[in-house]
């Protein structure tokens, strides 16, 4: 199972007096509906005073999904699939997947107290969980996360239907990919009158 944490989310780090890394914990839940595809820190320099976690949630077709995205706490001691003691949805309905991160913590002694996950209306967790979020040493940082629905994609997110109206096959099978490339090259050659 691939670790979705970016390098700057695997250990606390500072450079030139600014936070450049945090220590987040990834808790996979292989049977849950959504997986955490990626999480990265928006470091102190880049955040420019912003303290938000921005979450993107995609369905199997790589389209935006309409789900409940929770900020949850406390992170320490939580075990899947129990409920978190406290959860909250984003405060701004116009930005449904953006959470304000206001909790400060000492990064030399502990992880941040917050977690983010996808859940149902009753707060049941429906995804992998990422924990340890917060403001290390009260420094202003942010986070970017991508969750996606588990399961095989129904189409290639880059290629849509081709000129012949045939849907492309999912990525991952080299032979199928090569056949798609060959078919597209044949169509281009035909279009430009270069048929063999």
Image (cartoon, rainbow, N blue to C red):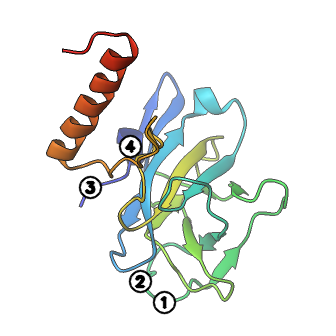
Q: Earlier in the sequence, mark 1 or mark 3?
A: 3
Q: CA distance from mark 1 to mark 4?
A: 26 Å
Judging from the image, what secondary structure is the residue with disc 2 in?
Answer: loop
Which of the pair 22/164 is nearer the observer? 164
Q: Is residue 11 above or below residue 117?
A: above
Q: Report which residue position mark 4 lands on.
A: 6
Judging from the image, what secondary structure is the residue with disc 1 in?
Answer: loop
Quarter-of-image position of residue 104: bottom right
**How many labels sit on residues?**
4
The nearer-to-camera label among 1 and 3 is 3
Q: Report which residue position mark 2 lands on.
A: 79
In this view of the protein, can residue 134 be seen by the observer?
no
Image quadrant where one finds the C terminus: top left
Asked whether disc 2 touches disc 1, contact meaning CB atoms under 8 Å apart, the reply is: yes
Q: Report which residue position mark 1 lands on.
A: 82
Q: CA distance from mark 2 to mark 1?
A: 6 Å
């Amino acid at each position: 199972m691939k670790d979705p944490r970016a390098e700057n989310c695997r250990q606390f780090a500072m450079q030139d007096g600014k936070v450049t890394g945090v220590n987040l914990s990834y808790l996979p839940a292989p049977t849950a509906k959504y997986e955490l595809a990626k999480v990265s820190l928006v470091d102190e320099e880049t955040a420019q005073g912003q303290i938000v976690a921005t979450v993107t949630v995609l369905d199997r077709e790589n389209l935006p999904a309409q789900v409940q995205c929770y900020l949850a706490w406390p992170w320490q001691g939580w075990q899947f699939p129990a409920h978190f003691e406290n959860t909250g949805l984003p405060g701004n309905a116009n930005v449904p997947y953006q959470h304000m991160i206001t909790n400060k913590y000492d990064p030399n002694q502990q992880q941040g107290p917050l977690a983010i996950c996808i859940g149902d209306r009753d707060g049941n967790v429906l995804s992998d969980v990422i924990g340890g979020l917060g403001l290390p040493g009260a420094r202003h940082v942010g986070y970017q996360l991508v969750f996606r629905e588990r399961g095989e994609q129904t189409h290639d997110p880059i290629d849509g239907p081709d000129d012949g109206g045939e849907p492309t096959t999912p990525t991952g099978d080299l032979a199928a990919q090569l056949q798609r490339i060959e078919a597209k090259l044949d169509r281009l050659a035909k279009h430009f009158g270069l048929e063999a």
